[in-house]
């Protein structure tokens, strides 16, 4: 591994330790130019070089460069909160990404980053550095530790941190035992929303959300922000999150999350996160039951709004949807067309550099996050920072996140409801017939169309994030939902005498709601969970398609979600790629129930000629296996159809039930599938 790469790794290790403090068991010393040291350490610069530099096995010399003016970054205090839902703070991050990317080579970027790191807010710095590294050709192979490794106390109960420190300091590396991270530590079983805590507080889920927003930042250089169908993907990824969460609620006999439409009603869902904003060593504030949103007036956090302003913003967005066009800031009308309308809306609702007419449409989604994130101290009277809703890596822990995003999803659906139902010609694939669809567990004895879930105990190394802590690995054990690996079998008949290419689209949807009432297709479509999407060749006659669950286009494997850059020894030469955006594999299936919860397994073979985008997906890139929710790096989204096709639009009135819809087309099939949850814990081997 080159000096530059090792240097970047040191920047991302133990983010609040000074950079010159040796990293990797004291083996790597970052030799900084004296003028790069902070005023506190400049006076002892000689001592630092002699003391730390002489013992390290490897020295990484940082060259001195002409530094750009970074004074804008003082807007985010070094010892304060970094809040990505604040436009002003987001702009600071965007500027820092631009400055890092503008450096002529990787060595200069390392130098600039080395200067900036110990002067800036650690979260801001790590956020911007990660984006810059992954978006530069010459740095994209630098392995980026996951946010869990950098800031572990934001993801696990901080109660384990002192225990982990003790184990690490006292016991030798080889003899250390894992520290158990408690499950369900945020509320008692008497709180109904606690039934979903295993899902909301899953480490992999929150890492996915963080990584998604790293791939799709709202601010920064245009070439980083302006990705293919970015606004649509914001809508679709969050729609899938809401669908999956609601299905999970049905498994726990709870109704779907209630959309947060009326901001003047109290919020019954309380949440006390108990995790630590580790850069500050303070816990995130909690929220009591039935609190009201009033307003937010914290100019220092760039969060100033009233409920009325939010209602106005929503009203204008709804007007645009109803009238079918957006008003640009020059007064012209931009039509919300069938294909591109959702992308425009996604950018307006989320709010990013690409949003049209920000002054008029406002900052709906981000400000909602801020209003809720600060509702415990809207005027900053008590100098309390934001709650978990104010930050990407933590927002999904809070039950209200799903109420907010159900509301946002309803806004998008208003647009989708205005579009005509798909024509038969858009749905059919003539000459192609699916004769059978099934899924089965691939290990041991399996029963057709019965899938299994259970708890699994896994381990993660928190060593990289133990600032001023023990060297080496510090392993913690945590428990999460898991499923037995399974495979789909699809039998398809090609009537023609030519080979045809098809896109296989696999969805899973609950058949009934929490009360056991059967869902009509027009409602069920909102709970369609995308499971997989891939391309197959169909030769003339009978075809048997086998697809394994771990090949899914929505997930990344466990190892990539929790991938760690080894904290115990010098970084190796493994060609890690930054590709940890993707739904965690262990959450691919809904939990199901003890007695078995039934689902529609829907499979469609669509005509690839209608799906193909100009450029074909580069399959060799091993990052491209979770494109359904994350898109492709430097490539167009690999499916021309609307995201969520064919369920993004409302069905024709005749298609009351899923069965009615499927029976009209030979290229679709449905099977009833059962998910059985087994309440036992199995250790990962
Ligand atoms: Cu998000």
Image (cartoon, rainbow, N blue to C red):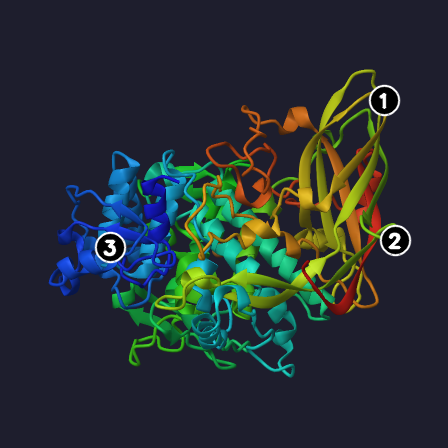
What secondary structure is marked by label 1?
loop
Q: Which of the 4 image quarters holds residue 470? A: bottom left
Q: Nearer the viewer, residue 188 or 585?
A: 585
- Whichever of labels 1 and 3 marks the residue nearer the N terminus, that label is 3
Residue beneath disc 3: 54
The answer to whether mark 3 is within 8 Å of ligand 1 is no
Crowd rating for badge 1 (residues with CA inside 10 Å; few <14, some 14–19, many 20+): some
Crowd rating for badge 3 (residues with CA inside 10 Å; few <14, some 14–19, many 20+): few
> Which x, y percent locates residue 491?
85, 34
- Whichever of labels 3 and 2 marks the residue nearer the N terminus, that label is 3
Disc 3 and disc 2 in contact, CB within 8 angstroms: no
Q: Does residue 75 sit above or below 289 in this rendering?
A: above
Q: Nearer the viewer, mark 3 or mark 2?
A: 3
> Which x, y percent locates residue 11?
33, 52
Residue beneath disc 1: 495
How far apart, in angstroms, are the residues tagged by discs 1 and 2?
A: 35 Å
Q: Residue at x 76, y 31 (%)?
A: 428
Crowd rating for badge 2 (residues with CA inside 10 Å; few <14, some 14–19, many 20+): few
Please tell me the numbered disc located at residue 445.
2
């Amino acid at each position: 591994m080159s000096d530059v790469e090792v240097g970047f790794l040191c920047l991302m290790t133990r983010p609040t330790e000074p950079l010159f403090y040796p990293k990797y068991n004291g083996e790597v010393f970052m030799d900084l130019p004296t003028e790069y040291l902070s005023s506190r350490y400049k006076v002892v610069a000689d001592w630092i070089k002699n003391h730390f530099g002489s013992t390290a096995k490897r020295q990484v010399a940082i060259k001195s460069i002409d530094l750009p003016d970074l004074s804008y970054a003082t807007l985010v205090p070094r010892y304060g909160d970094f809040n990505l839902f604040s436009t002003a703070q987001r702009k600071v991050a965007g500027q820092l990404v631009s400055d890092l990317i503008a450096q002529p080579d990787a060595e200069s970027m390392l130098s600039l980053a080395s200067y900036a790191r110990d002067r800036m807010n650690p979260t801001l710095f790590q956020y911007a550095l990660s984006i810059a590294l992954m978006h530069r050709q010459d740095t994209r192979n630098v392995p980026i530790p996951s946010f869990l490794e950098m800031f572990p106390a934001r993801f696990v109960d901080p109660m384990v941190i002192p225990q982990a420190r003790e184990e690490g300091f006292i016991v030798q590396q080889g003899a250390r035992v894992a520290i158990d991270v408690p499950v369900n530590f945020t509320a008692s079983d008497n709180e109904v929303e606690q039934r979903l805590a295993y899902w909301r507080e899953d480490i992999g889920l929150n890492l996915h959300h963080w990584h998604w927003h790293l791939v799709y930042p709202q601010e920064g250089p245009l070439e980083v922000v302006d990705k293919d169908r970015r606004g649509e993907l914001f809508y679709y990824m969050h729609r899938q999150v809401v669908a999956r969460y609601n299905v999970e609620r049905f498994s726990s006999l709870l109704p779907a999350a209630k959309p947060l439409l009326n901001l003047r009603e109290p919020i019954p869902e309380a949440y006390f996160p108990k995790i630590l904003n580790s850069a500050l060593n303070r816990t995130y504030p909690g929220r009591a039951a039935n609190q009201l949103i009033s307003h937010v007036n914290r100019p220092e956090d760039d969060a100033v709004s009233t409920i009325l302003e939010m209602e106005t913003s929503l009203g204008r967005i709804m007007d645009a949807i109803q009238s079918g066009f957006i008003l640009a800031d020059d007064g012209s009308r931009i039509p919300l067309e069938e294909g591109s309308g959702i992308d425009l809306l996604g950018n307006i609702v989320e709010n990013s550099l690409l949003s049209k007419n920000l002054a008029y449409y406002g900052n709906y989604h981000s400000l909602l996050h801020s209003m809720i994130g600060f509702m415990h101290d809207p005027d900053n009277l008590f100098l309390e920072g934001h709650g978990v809703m104010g930050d990407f890596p933590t927002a999904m822990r809070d039950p209200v996140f799903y109420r907010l995003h159900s509301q946002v999803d309803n806004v998008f659906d208003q647009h989708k409801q205005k579009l005509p139902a798909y024509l038969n010609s858009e749905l059919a694939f003539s000459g192609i017939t699916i004769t059978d669809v099934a899924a089965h567990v691939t290990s041991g004895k399996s029963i057709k169309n019965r899938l299994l879930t259970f708890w699994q105990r896994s381990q993660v190394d928190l060593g990289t994030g133990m600032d001023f802590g023990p060297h080496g690995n510090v392993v913690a054990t945590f428990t999460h939902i898991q499923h037995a690996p399974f495979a789909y079998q699809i039998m398809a008949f090609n009537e023609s005498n030519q080979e045809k290419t098809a896109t296989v689209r696999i969805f899973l949807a609950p058949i009934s709601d929490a009360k056991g009432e059967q869902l009509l297709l027009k409602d069920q479509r909102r709970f369609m969970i995308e499971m997989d999407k891939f391309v197959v060749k169909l030769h003339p006659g009978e075809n048997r398609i086998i697809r394994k669950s771990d090949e899914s286009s929505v997930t990344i494997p466990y190892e990539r979600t929790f991938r760690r850059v080894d904290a115990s020894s010098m970084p190796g030469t493994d060609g890690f790629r930054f590709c940890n955006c993707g739904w965690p594999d262990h959450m691919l299936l809904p939990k199901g129930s003890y007695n078995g919860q039934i689902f529609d397994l829907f499979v469609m073979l669509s005509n690839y000629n209608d799906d193909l985008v100009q450029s074909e997906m580069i399959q060799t890139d091993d990052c491209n296996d979770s494109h359904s929710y994350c898109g492709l790096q430097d490539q167009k989204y690999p499916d021309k159809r609307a995201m969520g096709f064919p369920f993004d639009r409302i069905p024709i009135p005749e298609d009351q039930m899923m069965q009615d819809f499927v029976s009209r087309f030979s290229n679709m099939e449905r099977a009833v599938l059962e998910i059985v949850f087994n309440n036992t814990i199995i250790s990962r081997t």
